[in-house]
Every structure is written in structure tokens, then in C-alpha cells.
């Protein structure tokens, strides 16, 4: 039996092992899900709503346990991990309103009555990465269940513990057997089977652009719908007229949060040339003061990188010949620790163009508004971004000009469960979250009733 040995990234201790789901086990899980889905979709909408509220309430009383599990498995700071577990509860609460609100249309036509239904797809496969194991899973399974589907969840091989616990909590809360199953294991086995199995009717994939393209190509064979949430190289654009103190104090969190292992990380810091020196003066103490250390410490803002392999990938970018402006601090000793790093590359350097997925930010000066927009858009990605300016008109123009799915002006917020989230260009396909997310897990059916 193959399994993965799990390691605490903060101290390199072994915390356990998780067996891989086999191909045969995936197929029997699909068969159980098909049966469970039919019964789930046949329930009264109010009963599905109530079941999801109970699931949310069960998660709520296990927030601390889930958070502690994520601290050990992923090295996330405890404060962040509590937010992540709370986000699962909130997503379930939000979408528990959906079963009773999946309202179709009545369309005026001659000769009878025409109405539309939002029918569930059936069984949905959700494939998630290791960077935010809990929230990203919930953004898939919450609205999918609410729309009347069954869900199979494949956590990342490296970070399966909270997903496995969520699967147990679903059953404890009374969700029917087979409706929400968590299948840890390899992407090339479990994830790939979601793509190839004809009874899995949609795949939601969050991860690298490379694997996402492979999943999309595989789904084409069955014309299977996909939602893709992929990489990013988002711009944080600071204009000379901005509140520079606020922009500089917010910048470290916008890229070093979760040690930069965030698809929304503002890893390109675009600064208007006339204020570059002043901005760097303000940024330096903010970066040096960013608290990197023990994930169990409530004051910690950044933990280690998730694994040795990932640490090496990130470190390889720093071998490039690029000027370092300054670095923050990181603990010595065991654990995959890396200090927050601010680089001053050229626009075409690899560090300024590729997703590093670590605590590294590239500062790039720009000349004017048009140059800022062009530079922000000079990327295969378009996921998130921030714009700092006191000029309202400029805020509007630049927000409309940047080709990105989730932007914020004078703040760094991007992901809220009540607002849509997803990427332009190679950052993804489709949207998660927000009021319309359940519709992405339905087919529209039109029925005409003749009145004879
Ligand atoms: P990854 O290597 O693409 O893996 C993502 C998931 O896909 C994992 O569960 C993986 O399983 C699985 N997988 C691998 N090969 C597969 C295959 N052939 N068929 C089906 N599934 C397969 O990404 P990662 O390294 O975990 O995560 C980092 C990337 O995710 C970054 O590029 C980041 O930008 C992106 N990301 C995007 C978002 C977003 O919302 N846009 C959010 C978070 C992360 P294994 O665990 O077995 O490899
Ligand atoms: Mg990978």
C-alpha cells in the first residue's frame, strides 16, 4: 500500500502518514456518490439547506482543532489557520441559502408556458493544492453541494489532514453517506480519474497552470466542464499621489502572507519612479518588522515554506543574478524557513515574470499611468492586484484597465466568500464564490408546456 509521510514544515518532525486512495477505490467512491447524489437532489430544498447549516455548525465547534491540524501539516500561523477554518464555516453558511434560491425563469413565449430549471450536474470532482487546503476545498464543495451535487474531494498529497477531518465532520453533522467523500492520494491517480471517469460530470481544479492545462485537455475528451483557478503574478501598483505610508505598511502582508504561497500574492510591486526612493525607505522597516517564526505564536505573521522540495524551488529563483534591496528575518535551525526578500530586477528577468510562490517580491518602477497599466498587463497571468492612489478617477481608470479578476483600490483584500473570485488569461477559467457560484454546478434546462 502506498502512502505519504507527512512532515511538519516548521520543525521537520514526522507527524503521520496517509494512505493513497487506489484507482479501484476512486471508482467505488464514484459509484457511491452517484447513488447519494440522486437522494440528495430529491430532498426538499429546505432540507438540503438545513443539512448544510448543520455541517457549518459542526465545523464551527471544531475551528480550533482544524486550525491546529493545519498549523502542524502546513506550517500556517495559528491566526491565519483559524481564519481558514472559519472561512469553511462561512462558505457553508453562505451557500446554505442557495438550495431555496436556485430560481429559474419564466420566459414569455406563444402557445404555452416556458420555464427554466437549474439542474444539478451529478458528481463533481474537486482537486485542490497544498497552499490553502481548507478554504479552496470549501469554495468548491460548498456551492456544489448546495446546487444538489455530490462531491469527491482530492486534497494535495502533502496536506490532506484538514480535508480528511472535514469529511468526517460532514458525516458527524448528518450529511448522508457517500455525498461528500475525501480521497487523499496522488494527482496522477485520483485527480486524473476525476477527469477520465464518465460519471464525474465536472472538475474543479486549483493548482499550477501546467497541470490545469492538462486537466482541461483531458476534460475535452468528454466535453466535461471545468473550473480552473491557476497561477498568478499580480501587481501592486503604487502611484506617487498615494498614501505612501499606508501602501508601504500593507505591501509586506500582500505578498508574504502564507510565505508567499498564495496565488493572489502581489509579487510585483510597481512604484511610480518619482517616489521610488521614498517608498523603499518606508518599505524597508515594514519588511524587516514582518514577524516570521513559530506558527503556534499568536503574533506570528509568516511561517515556513510547506516542504523541502518547494523550498528548493523558491531558493533556485534567488540564485539568479538579481539585486536584493533588503531582506527580513527568519529563524535558524530545522524547518523550511526563508526570509522575506525584496528584489530590484529588470522587467524581463525571470523573477519579475514567473510565479515564484514564495516570500519574494520584485519592485519595478514605472513612468506614468499608461506605463503602469501596460506593465501590470504584461504577463500571461491576471488573477488579482492592488492600486494605491488618492485620485478617484485614476483608481477607476486603472481598475478598468488592468486585466485581472480580483482587484482592490487602496487595500489588499481580494477573496471574500460573497464576491466572485477567479482569473483572466492563464490564471484560470470560470469564477468561484459570490452569489452565482452554485450556478456553475448546474445545467440550465428549458421546458416548454403547451397549453394546447
Ligand atoms: P499542482 O501541482 O498543480 O497540484 C494541484 C493539485 O492537482 C494537487 O492536488 C495535485 O496532486 C493535483 N494533480 C497533480 N497532477 C494531476 C493530474 N495529472 N491530474 C489531476 N490532478 C493532478 O499545484 P500545487 O503545486 O499543489 O500548487 C501550487 C500552484 O497552485 C501555484 O501555481 C498556484 O498559483 C496555484 N494556486 C492557484 C489558486 C487560485 O485560486 N488561482 C489557489 C491556490 C494555488 P498532488 O498533490 O498529488 O501533486
Ligand atoms: Mg505540484
Image (cartoon, rainbow, N blue to C red):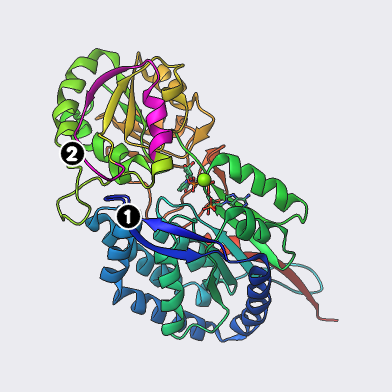
The one nearer the camera, 362 or 93, is: 362
Measured from the top left, where is residue 221 in percent x and y? 78, 52
Report the residue that reaches farthest toward the right.
452
Using the numbered discs, state the Cα–Cα distance from disc 2 to disc 1 in whole angstroms. Answer: 22 Å
The one nearer the camera, 427 or 376, is: 427
At x 46%, y 82%, the residue is 171
The one nearer the camera, 447 or 436, is: 436
Q: Is residue 231 left or right of residue 83?
A: right
Q: Is residue 249 left or right of residue 156?
A: left
Callout count: 2
Q: Residues within 10 Å of mark 2 (few under 14, many from 20)?
A: many
Q: Which of the marked residues, 2 or 1, is nearer the chain's N terminus?
A: 1
Q: Which mark is residue 8?
A: 1
Measured from the top left, where is residue 427 in percent x and y? 53, 40
Measured from the top left, where is residue 52 in percent x and y? 45, 78
At x 19%, y 46%, the residue is 293
Q: Residues within 10 Å of mark 1 (few under 14, many from 20)?
A: many
Q: Is mark 1 within 8 Å of ligand 1?
A: no
Q: Which mark is residue 290?
A: 2
Measured from the top left, where is residue 360 in percent x and y? 33, 31
Between marks 2 and 1 in the image, the one whose residue lies nearer the viewer? 1
Looking at the rendered structure, the secondary structure element under dot 2 is: loop
Q: Is residue 228 above or below residue 24?
A: above
Report the residue that reaches farthest toward the front.
1
Amino acid at each position: 500500500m502506498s502512502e505519504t509521510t507527512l512532515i511538519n514544515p516548521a520543525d521537520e518532525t514526522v507527524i503521520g502518514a496517509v494512505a493513497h486512495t487506489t484507482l479501484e477505490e476512486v471508482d467505488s467512491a464514484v459509484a457511491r456518490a452517484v447513488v447519494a447524489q440522486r437522494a440528495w437532489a430529491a430532498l426538499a430544498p429546505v432540507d438540503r439547506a438545513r443539512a448544510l447549516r448543520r455541517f457549518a455548525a459542526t465545523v464551527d465547534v471544531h475551528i480550533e482543532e482544524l486550525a491546529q491540524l493545519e498549523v502542524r501539516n502546513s506550517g500556517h500561523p495559528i491566526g491565519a489557520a483559524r481564519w481558514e477554518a472559519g472561512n469553511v464555516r462561512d462558505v457553508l453558511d453562505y451557500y446554505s441559502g442557495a438550495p431555496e434560491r436556485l430560481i429559474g425563469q419564466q420566459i414569455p413565449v406563444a402557445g404555452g408556458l416556458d420555464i427554466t430549471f437549474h439542474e444539478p450536474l451529478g458528481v463533481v470532482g474537486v482537486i485542490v493544492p497544498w497552499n490553502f487546503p481548507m478554504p479552496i476545498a470549501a469554495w468548491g464543495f460548498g456551492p456544489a453541494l448546495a446546487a444538489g451535487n455530490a462531491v469527491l474531494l482530492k486534497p494535495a498529497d502533502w496536506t490532506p489532514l484538514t480535508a480528511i477531518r472535514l469529511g468526517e465532520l460532514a458525516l458527524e453533522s448528518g450529511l448522508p453517506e457517500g455525498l461528500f467523500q475525501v480521497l487523499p492520494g496522488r494527482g496522477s491517480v485520483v485527480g486524473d480519474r476525476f477527469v477520465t471517469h464518465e460519471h464525474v460530470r465536472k472538475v474543479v481544479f486549483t493548482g499550477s497552470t501546467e497541470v490545469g492545462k492538462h486537466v482541461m485537455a483531458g476534460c475535452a475528451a468528454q466535453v466535461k466542464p471545468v473550473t480552473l483557478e491557476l497561477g498568478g503574478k499580480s501587481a501592486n501598483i503604487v502611484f506617487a499621489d498615494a498614501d505612501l505610508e499606508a501602501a508601504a505598511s500593507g505591501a509586506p502582508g500582500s505578498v508574504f502572507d502564507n510565505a508567499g504561497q498564495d496565488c493572489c500574492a502581489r509579487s510585483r510591486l510597481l512604484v511610480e519612479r518619482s517616489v521610488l526612493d521614498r517608498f523603499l525607505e518606508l518599505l524597508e522597516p515594514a519588511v524587516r518588522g514582518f514577524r516570521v517564526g513559530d506558527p503556534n505564536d499568536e503574533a506570528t505573521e509568516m511561517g515556513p515554506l510547506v516542504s523541502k522540495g518547494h523550498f528548493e524551488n523558491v531558493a533556485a529563483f534567488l540564485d539568479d543574478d538579481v539585486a536584493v534591496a533588503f531582506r527580513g528575518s527568519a529563524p535558524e535551525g530545522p524547518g523550511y524557513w526563508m526570509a522575506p526578500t525584496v528584489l530590484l530586477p529588470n522587467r524581463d528577468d525571470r523573477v519579475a515574470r514567473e510565479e515564484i510562490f514564495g516570500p519574494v517580491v520584485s519592485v519595478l518602477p514605472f513612468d506614468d499611468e499608461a506605463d503602469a497599466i501596460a506593465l501590470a498587463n504584461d504577463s500571461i497571468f491576471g488573477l488579482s492586484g492592488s492600486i494605491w492612489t488618492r485620485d478617484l478617477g485614476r483608481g477607476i481608470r486603472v481598475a478598468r484597465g488592468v486585466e485581472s479578476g480580483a482587484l482592490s483600490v487602496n487595500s489588499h483584500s481580494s477573496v471574500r466568500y460573497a464576491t466572485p473570485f477567479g482569473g483572466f488569461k492563464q490564471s484560470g477559467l470560470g469564477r468561484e464564490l459570490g452569489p452565482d457560484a452554485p450556478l456553475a454546478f448546474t445545467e440550465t434546462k428549458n421546458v416548454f408546456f403547451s397549453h394546447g
